[in-house]
């Protein structure tokens, strides 16, 4: 794999600096950082990172998000820590959610009783839609 930039400072000025565990090591001339060729790993698409953080902010738990998106709850916890996401603390309510296709979503909103006295958010989830609902004035 070809090294493009220093992973520490982003400089393109580096030199070879030995071999460790049969992997070429490099040294950045700008920040004196030693690094190796990055391993090719599994990377989750940014769409799912953003979607999981949105769902977290809406009040869903890590495991609920895991069941919906199919992404490990540990990965979601790591993203929350990495991006320093703070969810407003409110233990008096917990949102409910439904996964609907376009026709089901239209039928849901035709009935006024479904949205009366509640907050509703609809977000895209691949080829379906996720409806998040919570009571507006819960005691």
Image (cartoon, rainbow, N blue to C red):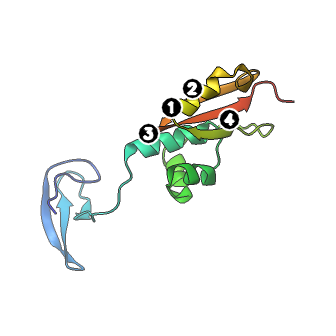
Circles 2, 1 touching at the beta carbon (< 8 Å): yes
Left or right of 82 on screen, residue 47: left
Q: Residues within 10 Å of mark 1 (few under 14, many from 20)?
A: few
Left or right of 25 on screen, residue 101: right
Q: Residue furthest bottom?
A: 21
* Residue receiving disc 2: 106
Screen quadrant of the N terminus: bottom left
Mark nearer the N terminus (3 vs 1): 1
* Residue receiving disc 3: 127
| Residue at 57% across, 49% down | 65
| Residue at 19% across, 48% down | 11
Marks 2 and 3 sit apart, C-alpha to C-alpha, by: 15 Å
Q: Secondary structure at mark 4?
A: loop
When asked about the image quadrant of residue 29, the answer is bottom left
Question: Along the line of sight, which residue is nearer the eye, 95 or 112?
Answer: 112
Q: Residues within 10 Å of mark 3 (few under 14, many from 20)?
A: few
Q: Residues within 10 Å of mark 4 (few under 14, many from 20)?
A: few
Tag of residue 88: 4
Mark nearer the N terminus (3 vs 4): 4
Marks 4 and 2 sit apart, C-alpha to C-alpha, by: 31 Å
Marks 3 and 1 sit apart, C-alpha to C-alpha, by: 9 Å
Label 3 vs label 1, nearer the camera: 1
Left or right of 133 on screen, residue 23: left
| Residue at 49% across, 55% down | 71
Marks 2 and 1 sit apart, C-alpha to C-alpha, by: 6 Å
Mark nearer the N terminus (4 vs 2): 4
Tag of residue 102: 1
Screen quadrant of the C terminus: top right
Q: Secondary structure at mark 1?
A: helix
Label 4 vs label 1, nearer the camera: 1
Marks 3 and 4 sit apart, C-alpha to C-alpha, by: 30 Å
């Amino acid at each position: 794999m070809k090294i493009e930039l220093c992973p520490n400072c982003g400089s393109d000025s580096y030199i070879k600096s030995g071999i460790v565990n049969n992997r070429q090591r490099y040294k950045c001339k700008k920040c004196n950082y030693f690094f190796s060729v990055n391993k090719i790993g599994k990377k989750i698409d940014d769409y799912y990172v953003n979607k999981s953080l949105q769902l977290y902010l809406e009040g869903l738990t890590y495991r609920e998000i895991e069941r919906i998106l199919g992404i490990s709850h540990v990965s979601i916890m790591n993203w929350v820590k990495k991006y320093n996401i703070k969810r407003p603390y409110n233990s008096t309510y917990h949102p409910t959610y439904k996964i609907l296709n376009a026709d089901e979503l239209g039928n849901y909103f035709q009935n006024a009783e479904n949205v009366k006295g509640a907050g509703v958010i609809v977000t895209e989830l691949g080829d379906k839609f996720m409806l998040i609902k919570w009571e507006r004035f819960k005691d």
